[in-house]
Amino acid sequence: MPNYIASLPRLGLNSLSRAREAGSRDRRRLAAIMFTDMVGYTALGQRNESLSLALVEEQRKLIRPILSRHSGKEIKTMGDAFLVEFPSALDAVRCAYDIQRATREFNISLPDEKRIHLRVGVHLGDVVESRGDISGDAVNVASRIESLAEDGGVCVTCQVYDHIQNKFELKLASLGVKPLKNVSMPIEVYRMVMPWEEEKAIPSALLDRRRIAVLPFTNISPDPADEYFADGMTEELISTMSRISGMKVIARTSIMGYKGGHKKVDEVARELGVGTVLEGSVRKAGNRIRITVQLIDSETSEHMWAESYDRELEDVFAVQSDISKTVAEALKVRLLPIEKERVEKVPTKNVQAYELYLKGLETAPWFEAGYPKENIERSRDYFERAVQLDPYFALAYAGLEDCYMHDYRYRAFDERAPKAENAAHKALEIDPDLAEAHIALGDALWHRYDFQGCEKEWKRAIELKPNSALAHEYYGAGLCMIFGKFEEAETELRKARELDPLSSSIRSWFQSLLYNSHQYDRALEEIAEEMKLHDSPGLHNALAGIYLVKGDYDNALIESEKAMATVSPDDRPFFISTLACIYAKTGRKEEAVKILNDLEELCKQRHYATYYDAFAPVYYCLGDYDGLFRTIQNAYDEHSGDFLFSLIDPLYDSLRTDPRFIALLKRVGLQK
């Protein structure tokens, strides 16, 4: 050691630096590597060099902030290409998605010749670092698979896929094993299925067999009135199979639109993006049931499994359990012991109580149905009769909570909240592992502004039932959004939409998320895409609200008037509120004040707690902030659900420094 130290001065500074560099030249490590490239850049450079250089500069301005957000280390740029290193595969893949999303938004308002077209490749492997640069097979592979991506697409290797599966919210579809230039062994490559591709038909080869749709069972009973039983079987099978984490089961609200069997299996499969379909029929006669099921591969339309069950009515749960386990086995999904236990659990031994529960589900206050008063009362009656017959029927208590809590348009909070919470607590006393009960209790606690409590309940529901679109929807839209955790909210809502792709409620929340996070152009694009599928007053009112905040009052008025043309009486206050705001902003204040007076009178005539949120924005647009805060306070006192979302509404951005606004945020618990 002394001889080595003594030798250092003789090396000199430059020699010592070279020695250190030589020692670090062979440093190897595992890294996630991203390679990006502009599509058609070479050809563009030959046609219009100045434009190609300008687009490269725009690309760099666009991409570099995104790299920073995802801990990406820019190694170098090579003309139009980026070479970037990440600490994890998940960081790299999320960054790749954000780059393509940002590029798409950048391109929306530009002519074709000024748009940026990117391809991205991501690989995970060993790299060799030398003098700030990296090399090795990982870099070579990333550059090779990038060329396999389509315009606006992302390709990843199987090494990346293995590290991020079940952690990344978007689907990764296999392109098969690909030979790559200067790479000794072929590698399986996956493409990222972008959210904006959802409306396109997915090639059958990309459909995941473990993503399954349980189509509405056909009622072939002698009595047409037994239709509820066939629908109930569909609902309960979806619910039972959703407890199995290895499968993705499409939710009820996306399924029931296919009732009647008017579409072929392969058509349904492509619309829902499923690789497997379960269909069947139910015949109920007295105390006997006959259930026939077929499991179909949506790519080949071949039957993978079929079975008929002739049983007594009380054996229906054993049939549901057997179907769920057999489907899992056919799809090569391993059931965890705890999942097997949950699938086999019998919710009630009272057949009459179960039938009442199924009838209650038919008219339960699902968001899709708009929960009219008569539906709520009918479902509540069925659920109450069910728990009278079986006081230990946890699912029926969870259904009761839903009815009590969603009665908010017709009853005051103090009339319904105790009943709702008691029903949810009763369900959990009976079955602490019932996901529906945790969702129900979280819902009740959310309206009490007990956000810590509802977060605990909704996260537990997701653990117990990872395929619950409702749990992801509630957690993402109800909790993450109001706390401004917009990225997490988007992740949860994407999971919900993957499980319930046709849900108008989830689509509406997603549009609301984009609006509340000031992503107005994305929100407008989402609504435009939905309008290609169907038109509705709600979509026009949402457009009007976005244009209002953007200050585009002409388009806001056009969309508001379209919304008002066909709106239902119950929703009319919210729609006319938007119109009043536009009037106030465009100098038609007398008309706005008249609407405001009408809304206040309506709220006095009958209990509509949420209507406070309808006329609060009108006060704001009229510049009457005292009236605004008085109204918001009333909404707070009534525990209005919509009130919480008004606290993050971009419309009120100018008030965020107002002491009254800050005090309200603190009082609710959204700010310390």
Image (cartoon, rainbow, N blue to C red):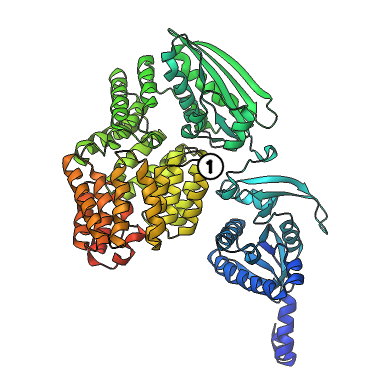
Q: Nearer the viewer, residue 515 or 491?
A: 515
From this view, report whether residue 665 is shown above or below residue 300.
below
Give the answer, above or below, for where 488 lies relative to 86. Answer: above
Q: Where residue 244 appears, x then y in whole percent?
A: 53, 33
Image quadrant where one finds the C terminus: bottom left
Q: Secondary structure at mark 1?
A: helix
Image location (x, y in percent) of residue 495 = 51, 45
Residue reaching furthest top? 286
Identify the residue position indicated by label 1 in the image: 498
At 44% from the left edge and 10% from the top edge, which residue is drawn?
Answer: 223
Residue 170 visible to an observer of this rendering: yes
> Does residue 138 lie above or below 439 as drawn?
below
Q: Is residue 212 left or right of residue 369?
A: right
Q: Nearest the camera: 269 or 267?
A: 267
In the image, residue 596 lies at what x, y percent?
A: 22, 52
Say whether residue 111 is left or right of residue 638: right
Asked where in the image residue 546 lies, by quadrant, the reply is bottom left
Q: Residue at x 67, y 50 (%)?
A: 191
- Residue 1 in which image quadrant: bottom right
- Residue drawn at (45%, 25%) of the image: 345
Query: In the picture, residue 122 is in which quadrant?
Result: bottom right
Give the residue type that dot 1 points to. Answer: Glu
514 with respect to 12 (left or right): left
Q: Report the front residue among 532 and 518.
A: 532
Viewer-closest of 408 and 237: 408
Q: Position of residue 313 (x, y in %)?
A: 45, 12
Q: Is residue 672 visible?
A: no
